[in-house]
């Protein structure tokens, strides 16, 4: 029994002594349960976000790395079958030196034989300001040569629990030789 009490005391020390790993939002099971208990009285909010996504495929420090491709990918004009894993910075402005507010972390794959279209599976992980420690989950089709591409926000964490919304992407700058791009995002998200 004494060993059990010491183990429980150790867990109490660990839980209260360690700072929150995901920023300022308490994501412990108890905090999430308390949040759910208050949910019936909560009011839904609309948040508008605007940022730039920097996808660097070819550079000394790439943020997008090819992890798979089909045998036909190198012969395909649309790069059909290519899959990349990304950790792309999200910034306030289009310049690479602009303040980083988070990262787009996930996977995108070329999924069309007819046009350059990607399936985007991303977590938008915010690490600055009032959204620090919060995420938005995006899953959708991105036809990169269309002027505007609309993709759904399917959920979120932290400030964005129970999120749903729309992300609209527009290419700000791209280089077909290097395949590096800066994409402007406007996000409208409903959350509690």
Image: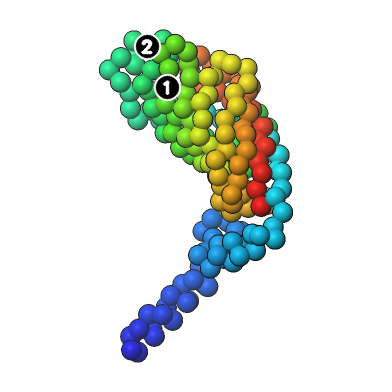
Q: Are marks 1 and 2 in contact (CB under 8 Å)?
A: yes
Question: Residue lying furthest bottom in this view?
Answer: 2
Q: Marks 1 and 2, how far apart in space? A: 10 Å
Q: Which residue is mark 1?
A: 110
Q: Is residue 6 visible?
A: yes
Residue extending farthest to the left is: 71
Q: Residue at x 37, y 11 (%)?
A: 76
Q: Is residue 135 visible?
A: no
On screen, 45 above or below 66?
below
Residue 162 tag number: none
> Residue 142, percent across and down?
53, 24
Residue 137 image position (x, y, % from top left): 53, 41
In percent of width and height, residue 183 lies at 60, 26
Location of residue 19 in the rendering, given as x and y in whole percent from the top left corner: 54, 65
**Picture quadrant of residue 75:** top left
Which residue is under mark 2? 76
Q: Secondary structure at mark 2?
A: loop
Please report the residue visible at 66 percent of the width from the left and 44 percent of the height from the top.
Answer: 190
The quarter in which the N terminus is drawn is: bottom left
Image quarter of residue 80: top left
Q: Nearer the viewer, residue 160 or 54?
A: 160
- Reply above or below: 31 against 168: below
Q: Is residue 94 left or right of residue 3?
A: right
Q: Answer few, some or many: residues within 10 Å of disc 1's Cα (few below 14, many 20 plus, some between 14 and 19).
A: many
Who comes first in sequence, dot 1 or dot 2? 2
């Amino acid at each position: 029994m004494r060993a059990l009490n010491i183990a429980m005391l150790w867990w109490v020390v660990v839980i209260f002594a360690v700072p929150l790993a995901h920023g300022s939002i308490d994501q412990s099971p108890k905090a999430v349960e308390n949040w759910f208990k208050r949910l019936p009285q909560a009011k839904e909010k609309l948040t508008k976000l605007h940022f730039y996504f920097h996808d660097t495929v070819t550079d000394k420090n790439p943020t997008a790395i090819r992890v798979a491709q089909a045998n036909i990918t190198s012969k395909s004009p649309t790069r059909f079958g290519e899959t990349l894993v990304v950790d792309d910075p999200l910034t306030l402005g289009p310049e690479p030196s602009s303040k980083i507010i988070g990262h787009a972390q996930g996977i995108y794959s070329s999924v069309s034989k007819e046009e350059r279209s990607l399936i985007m599976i991303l977590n938008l992980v915010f690490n600055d300001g009032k959204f620090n420690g919060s995420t938005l989950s995006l899953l959708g089709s991105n036809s990169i040569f269309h002027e505007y591409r609309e993709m759904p926000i399917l959920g979120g964490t932290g400030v964005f629990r129970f999120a749903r919304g729309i992300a609209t992407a527009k290419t700000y700058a791209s280089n077909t030789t290097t395949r590096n791009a800066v994409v402007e995002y406007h996000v409208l998200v409903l959350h509690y």
